[in-house]
Image (spheres, rainbow, N blue to C red):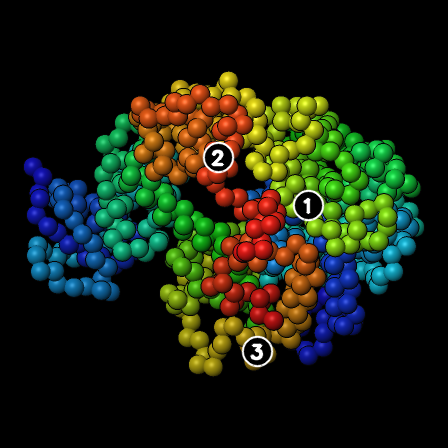
C-alpha cells in the first residue's frame, strides 16, 4: 500500500545522495516527498524529516535502473538537470524517474509529456552553460607554470566539462576554479582532481598581475585583444547579436572584453 | 618552440613588430567568412596538445556578431595579383607584412593553450608563385603537427594553381582545405580578376576530392592509412559584386556541392573596399538580408531535402526578400498543403514553413506516444505563427478558408514582424 504521509528527505546535496533518496522513497513506498539539502536544514512543521546517508551501492542500483529504462541521452539528462541546483529539482526528477520506470516505450522522447519537457528544458540550459564554459574559459599562465582560469557559471557545470579539458590540454597543468561554488578542477598531467583554494586576499580575478602571472601572459593577452579588434568588420556591426552570443555577465573574465 | 620563461624578456624578438604584423594580417584575413572548426576526427595522441574530435566551439564573437573560432590570418598580404574585389590586391595602397613560419606556430600554440581558439585558419596573398606560397602554408601545418604534436584544427587555403604534390601534402596535415571561387560566374571573374581563370581554382579542389576518395577506400583495407583532410573542403562566393542573380549563385553552389563533395559553401555579402568603377561604390550597404536568404536556401538543399531548381529556376531567378525561401516555395505550391503532422513522413514535415528539423524530429518521436494537437505542438516549442496555415493535427480547429498563395502571404506578413524590418521598409526609420 502507498504511504501518503508527507516526508522530507534531507541529504548531502550530491547526486549519489539524491539517488539514495530515490531508493528510500521506493523502499518505503512514499508518495509525498520533498527534499532538503543538508546545508539548509529546516525543521518542517508537518510530516517528518528523515536524514538520508549517501549509500553508493543503493545509488548505483537506482542509476542502473534509470539507464535500463531510458536512452543514454535520457539518463544523462537526469544528471545534467540535477546540476542546475534549481529549487525542488529533486522532486521533479523523482517524478520523471517514477514515470520512466512504468513507461513501456523509453519515455525520454515523449516531448508532449510535461515532465519530460520540463526536465529536458532544464537539462538544455545546463548543457548550454557547459558549452559556454568550454568556450569562455580563459587560461592565464601562472609563475608556477600552471594554466589558471576562474569562472562563475550559472550552474554547477565543472563535472560536465572535466573530460573535455582533460583530453584537450593533456600536456599542460591547468586549474579551472569556480569562484561561486568555491571549488575547482586541477589537472596534474595525470588525472583531474577536485580541489579547494585559499585565494590571497588581494587576488582580483579580473586582473592579471605579475605577482601571480608570467610576463608573457600579459603579452599574449594583448595580442589576443589586438586580434579580436582587427578581425571585426565595422560596416557589419551588430551589437544585439554580439550580446546574444556573449551575454554581459560573462564579460568580466573574458580577456578580449577587458580592454 | 620558443619556451615560456619567467624572465621579463619577451618570447618574441620584437613584441611591437609581432603586434603590428598580427593587426595587419588579421585585418586582411577577416573577409573570409569560413569559421567552422567541426567535422574533424583528430583526437589527442601521445598526450600532446589539442583535440579536434567534437563539435566546433565559438570561443568568442566579434561586435558584428560573427563567431571567433580559429586564429584567422594571412601568412602575408603581399600579392602579385590585382583582383578588383580583394583588399590585398597589388594596386591597393596599404601596409604590407609577412609572418615567419615560426611566428605563426608560436601564436597558434600560445593562443590555443589559453583556450582562445580551436586552431588555425591560414590563408595568404600570392607571392612569387602559387607553389612557393602553398609550400609555406604547408610548412606551418607540418611544423605544428610534427614538432609541436598539435592536434587542434587546421584550415589551410588551397592556393589556385598549386601543384598536386603540394595539395597532397597539405591534406596530410590540415583538417580542412578550401579554395575560394569568389565570383559565381565566369563572366564576372573575367571582368574583376582577368589574371585568374576558373581552371586554376578547380585543379586543387579536384586533387583534394580525389585524394579524399582514395583515402576512404584505402582506410577500409589498411586501418593505419594516414588521414587526409578529415573535415573536407569548402569554398566561398562573394555576393553582389558582379551583378549575378540568386539562381546563378545557388546553381553554382549546387554544382560544387555535387561535383566536389564540398562540406560547405560560404556566401559573403560584398563589403565595398574600392573606388573601382566595376564594383559597388564605397558606402553602399552590405547585402546582409540577401546573404541570409542564400544561406537559408543552402540549408534547404543540404538538410531539408530540397532540390535547387524547386527554389530557384528560370521563372524565379531571385529569392524573395520579404519571406524566407521555404515559405516562398510553399506559397507557390499550395496544393501540397495542409500536411497532417500525425501521418506525414519526414520529407513532407520538413517542408512545412516555420518548422525546423529539430521540431520535425521531436514530432516524429512524440507522435509515437499519442496523436498531437495544437497544445502539444505549442508545448514542444513548435513555432506556429506561420506553420498553422500549412498543417492539420488532432483537432477540429484548422485553417478552413481556401486561400491562394498571394492572399496567404499578405495575411502572414501582416501578422509577423521581421528582424529585417528596417531593410525591408526603410521609411519606418523616420519615425523609429
- Name the residue carrying label 1: B287
Confirm or deny contact between disc 2 and disc 1 (CB under 8 A).
no
Does the image show residue B285?
A: yes
- Label disc, if present, on residue B412 of the rendered structure: 2
Q: In this view, does B92 lie above or below A1?
A: below
Which of label 1 and label 3 is nearer to you? Answer: 1
Q: Mark 1 lies on which chain?
A: B
Q: Position of residue A48 (x, y in %)?
A: 9, 56
Discs 2 and 1 share one subunit: yes
The subunit letter for the residue under badge 2 reads B
Residue at 24% x, 36% y: name it: A99
Say which quadrant the C terminus of chain B sits in.
Answer: bottom right
Which chain's residue wears label 3?
A
Of residue B31 and residue B232, the one placed in the foreground of this image is B31
Task: Name the residue at 55% across, 44% down.
Answer: B55
Which residue corresponds to mark 3?
A: A209
Tags 1 and 3 in contact by the CB under 8 Å rule?
no
Question: From the viewer's perspective, is the residue at label 2 or at label 1 nearer?
Answer: 2
Residue at image point 63% right, 68% down: A221
Q: Please identify the quadrant where the N terminus of chain B is shown.
A: bottom right
Q: Residue A214 appears at what percent x and percent y?
A: 62, 74
Marks 3/2: CA–CA distance: 57 Å
Q: Can I make out residue B162 in this image?
A: no
Residue at point 51%, 37% (across, down) = B413
The CA span between labels 1 and 3 is 45 Å
Amino acid at each position: 500500500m502507498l504511504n501518503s504521509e508527507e516526508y522530507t528527505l534531507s541529504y548531502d546535496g550530491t547526486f549519489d545522495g539524491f539517488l539514495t533518496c530515490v531508493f528510500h522513497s521506493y523502499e518505503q513506498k512514499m508518495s509525498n516527498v520533498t527534499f532538503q539539502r543538508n546545508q539548509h536544514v529546516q525543521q518542517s512543521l508537518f510530516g517528518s524529516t528523515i536524514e538520508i546517508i549517501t549509500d553508493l551501492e543503493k545509488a548505483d542500483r537506482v542509476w542502473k535502473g534509470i539507464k535500463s529504462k531510458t536512452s543514454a541521452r535520457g539518463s544523462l539528462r537526469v544528471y545534467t538537470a540535477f546540476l542546475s541546483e534549481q529549487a525542488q529539482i529533486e522532486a521533479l526528477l523523482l517524478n520523471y524517474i517514477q514515470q520512466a520506470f512504468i513507461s513501456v516505450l523509453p519515455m525520454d522522447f515523449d516531448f508532449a509529456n510535461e515532465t519530460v519537457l520540463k526536465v529536458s528544458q532544464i537539462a538544455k540550459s545546463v548543457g548550454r552553460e557547459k558549452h559556454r564554459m568550454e568556450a569562455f574559459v580563459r587560461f592565464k599562465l601562472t609563475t608556477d607554470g600552471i594554466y589558471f582560469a576562474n569562472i562563475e557559471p550559472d550552474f554547477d557545470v565543472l563535472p560536465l566539462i572535466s573530460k573535455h579539458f582533460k583530453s584537450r590540454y593533456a600536456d599542460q597543468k591547468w586549474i579551472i576554479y569556480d569562484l561561486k561554488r568555491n571549488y575547482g578542477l586541477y589537472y596534474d598531467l595525470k588525472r583531474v582532481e577536485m580541489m579547494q583554494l585559499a585565494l590571497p586576499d588581494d587576488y582580483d580575478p579580473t586582473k592579471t598581475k605579475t605577482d601571480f602571472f608570467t610576463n608573457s601572459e600579459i603579452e599574449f593577452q594583448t595580442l589576443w585583444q589586438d586580434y579580436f579588434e582587427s578581425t571585426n568588420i565595422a560596416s557589419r556591426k551588430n551589437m544585439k547579436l554580439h550580446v546574444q552570443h556573449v551575454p554581459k555577465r560573462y564579460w568580466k573574465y573574458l580577456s578580449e572584453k577587458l580592454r | 618552440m620558443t619556451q615560456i620563461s619567467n624572465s621579463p624578456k619577451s618570447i618574441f624578438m620584437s613584441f611591437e613588430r609581432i603586434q603590428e604584423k598580427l593587426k595587419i594580417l588579421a585585418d586582411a584575413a577577416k573577409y573570409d567568412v569560413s569559421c567552422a572548426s567541426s567535422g574533424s576526427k583528430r583526437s589527442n595522441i601521445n598526450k600532446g596538445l589539442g583535440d579536434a574530435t567534437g563539435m566546433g566551439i565559438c570561443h568568442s564573437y566579434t561586435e558584428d556578431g560573427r563567431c571567433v573560432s580559429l586564429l584567422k590570418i594571412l601568412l602575408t598580404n603581399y600579392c602579385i595579383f590585382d583582383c578588383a574585389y580583394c583588399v590585398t590586391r597589388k594596386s591597393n595602397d596599404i601596409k604590407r607584412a609577412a609572418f615567419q613560419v615560426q611566428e605563426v606556430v608560436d601564436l597558434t600554440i600560445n593562443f590555443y593553450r589559453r583556450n582562445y581558439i580551436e586552431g588555425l585558419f591560414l590563408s595568404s596573398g600570392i607571392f612569387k608563385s602559387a607553389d612557393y606560397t602553398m609550400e609555406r602554408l604547408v610548412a606551418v601545418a607540418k611544423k605544428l603537427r610534427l614538432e609541436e604534436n598539435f592536434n587542434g584544427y587546421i584550415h589551410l587555403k588551397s592556393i589556385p594553381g598549386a601543384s598536386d604534390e603540394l595539395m597532397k601534402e597539405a591534406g596530410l596535415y590540415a583538417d580542412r582545405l578550401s579554395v575560394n571561387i569568389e565570383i559565381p560566374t565566369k563572366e564576372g571573374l573575367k571582368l574583376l580578376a582577368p589574371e585568374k581563370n576558373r581552371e586554376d581554382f578547380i585543379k586543387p579542389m579536384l586533387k583534394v576530392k580525389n585524394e579524399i576518395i582514395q583515402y576512404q577506400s584505402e582506410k577500409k583495407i589498411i586501418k593505419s592509412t594516414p588521414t587526409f583532410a578529415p573535415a573536407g573542403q569548402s569554398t566561398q562566393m562573394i555576393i553582389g559584386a558582379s551583378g549575378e542573380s540568386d539562381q546563378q549563385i545557388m546553381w553554382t553552389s549546387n554544382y560544387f556541392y555535387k561535383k566536389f563533395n564540398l562540406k560547405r559553401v560560404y556566401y559573403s555579402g560584398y563589403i565595398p573596399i574600392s573606388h573601382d568603377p566595376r564594383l559597388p561604390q564605397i558606402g553602399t550597404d552590405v547585402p546582409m538580408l540577401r546573404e541570409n536568404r542564400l544561406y537559408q536556401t543552402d540549408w534547404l538543399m543540404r538538410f531539408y531535402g530540397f532540390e535547387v531548381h524547386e527554389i530557384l529556376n528560370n521563372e524565379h531567378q531571385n529569392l524573395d526578400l520579404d519571406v524566407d525561401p521555404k515559405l516562398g516555395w510553399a506559397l507557390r505550391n499550395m496544393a501540397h498543403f495542409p500536411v497532417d503532422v500525425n501521418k506525414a513522413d519526414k520529407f513532407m514535415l520538413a517542408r512545412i514553413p516555420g518548422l525546423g528539423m529539430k521540431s520535425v524530429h521531436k514530432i516524429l518521436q512524440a507522435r509515437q506516444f499519442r496523436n498531437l494537437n495544437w497544445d502539444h505542438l505549442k508545448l514542444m516549442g513548435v513555432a506556429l505563427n506561420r506553420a498553422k496555415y500549412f498543417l492539420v493535427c488532432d483537432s477540429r480547429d484548422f485553417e478552413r478558408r481556401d486561400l491562394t498563395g498571394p492572399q496567404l502571404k499578405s495575411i502572414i506578413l501582416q501578422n509577423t514582424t521581421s528582424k529585417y524590418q528596417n531593410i525591408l521598409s526603410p521609411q519606418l526609420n523616420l519615425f523609429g
